[in-house]
Every structure is written in structure tokens, then in C-alpha cells.
Amino acid sequence: MDMQLIENNIQEIIDSLEKEVMALVTDETIDKQMTNIHMKPLASTKKILLNALESIQMVDRLYKEELEKVDE
């Protein structure tokens, strides 16, 4: 599994989400309530991606540990 590729792609998505958040925060035409409504899915998506990345890293680590046991 190409962990670097996975990490880079997830980071690109997170960077894009953060740009959307900054655009919302700096948009003075949107009131606070609407800003909060628009931010919730962005924040949730970022958290889901970070959790997914953590899970993928754990699976990769366990896979490598299993390989080491077999090689011994």
C-alpha cells in the first residue's frame, strides 16, 4: 500500500476544506448562523478523513508487523 500517496491525497482534500472554511469565515455577506450551518459539514468531513487516515495507518502498521513475524 502506498501510504505516502494516501496521506498526500487526504492532505490535499483537507487543505481544500480549510480553504472553503476560510472563505466562509471571511465572507461578510453571510451571517453568523449561516456560516455555522455551512461549517458543520466541512468540519465533520475533515474529522472523518483524519479518522480514516489514522485507521489506514494502523492497518498498514499491523500488516508490516505481521510480515515481520512471518519472516522471522
Image (spheres, grey):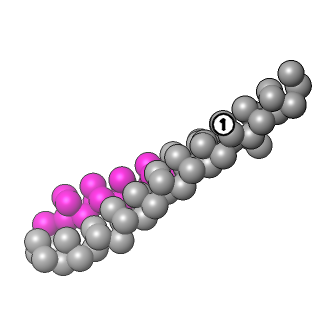
Q: Which residues are magenta?
A: 12-28
Which quarter of the rendered picture does the C terminus lie within? top right
**Picture quarter with the N terminus:** top right
Q: Residue at x 23, y 76 (%)?
A: 37
25, 11: nearer the viewer: 11
- Left or right of residue 19, residue 59 in this image: right
Residue corresponding to mark 1: 61
Q: Position of residue 60 (x, y in %)?
A: 69, 41
Q: Is residue 38 left or right of residue 6?
A: left
Q: Quadrant of residue 28?
A: bottom left
Residue 44 is left or right of residue 36, and the answer is right
**Does residue 13 belong to the magenta stretch?**
yes
Disc tally is 1
Is residue 1 on the magenta stretch?
no
Q: Position of residue 20 (x, y in %)?
A: 35, 60
Percent of width and height locating residue 41: 35, 71
Q: Residue at x 77, y 36 (%)?
A: 66
What is the quadrant of residue 8 in the picture?
top right
Image location (x, y in percent) of residue 38: 28, 73
